[in-house]
Amino acid sequence: MDFFASLPEGLISDIISLTSAVDAARLSVISRVFKAAAESDSVWGRFLPQDLSDILLRSRSPVVFSNMKELYFTLCNSPILLDDGSKLSFSLDKSSGKKCFMIAARELDITWGNKQYYWELKPHPDSRFSEVANLRSVCWLDIRGVITTNMLSATTDYAAYLVFRLSDMACGLESAKSLVRFVSQECDEEAENRADGVSLFGGQSNRRGGSQTSNELRRERSDGWMEVELGSFYNDQGDDGDVEARLIEIWDLNWKSGLIVEGIEFRPKS
């Protein structure tokens, strides 16, 4: 006898909606009643951000879906471009349903980024955006991405990631550092003094000394790009104003080249 068959489907749906998308998938195999409840719109609608309708209105292209579960996984697997498609993309974290945003290279604050002799904005066949930033040659590397905390999911640990590639001729990037700061709570100088070393060249050690953790090393993404964590922060209620993620090398002043930047992504910390 199927004990769960005696329970109202609505009650089961309410229980499952208090879990997560991962748990819903697992619970769907318990029984036919659980499967029906676990795939209902009432369950998957609660896994989606409350302001999702407003975000979808900003999508550059219509998002096609037949039910809330399909919408959930569409947004997890296929980031959507917002507004004119050149500045920002949106997706969901598959395990939590929390919001993820990537700021395109053209929207980053890059020192000398508007000087074509140093940086060049150009299309890339593998980028979700219309342009990436190509580093020709600089001695002062400073890349900043800023997002407002009320855009992000509340009560969530976030991390910021530089999404990039390196050309075959890349050089001078071994000693980069990174940081994340709340703009209204910490000045540039204070944040720079606590910046951590990062390696854009994989397992190589940082020339400025010290050991590196796995978070400071680059990783390959499912979309074919590389990423390195720039830092993390806790987004409480989204009322901390702007948060800035930054990649810097402003001390050695050696010449650097060959960095291809797609953007900076803010997503829940795994």
Image (cartoon, rainbow, N blue to C red):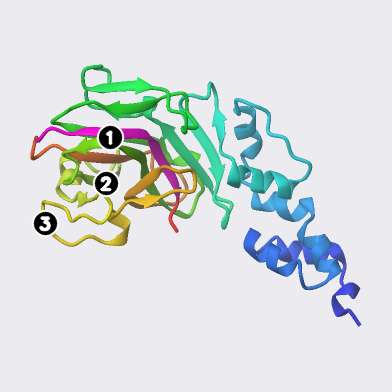
Q: CA–CA distance between discs 3 and 2?
A: 15 Å
Q: Which residue type does callout 3 highlight?
A: Gly
Magenta segment: 254-267
Q: Which residue type does callout 2 highlight?
A: Leu
Give the residue at mark 1. 259
Kind of element beneath mark 3: loop
Q: Few, some or many C-alpha atoms within 10 Å of disc 3 (few <14, some 14-19, many ≥20)?
A: few
Q: Which residue type does callout 1 highlight?
A: Leu
Residue at 69% x, 68% y is: 26
Q: Few, some or many C-alpha atoms within 10 Å of disc 1 (few <14, some 14-19, many ≥20)?
A: many
Give the residue at mark 3. 209
Earlier-in-chain disc, 3 versus 1: 3
Front residue of 225 and 234: 225
Q: Is residue 165 visible?
A: yes
Kind of element beneath mark 2: loop
Question: Which label was assigned to residue 200?
Answer: 2
CB atoms of marks 1 and 2 within 8 Å: yes
Q: Residue furthest front?
A: 168
Classify residue 116 by image quadrant.
Answer: top left
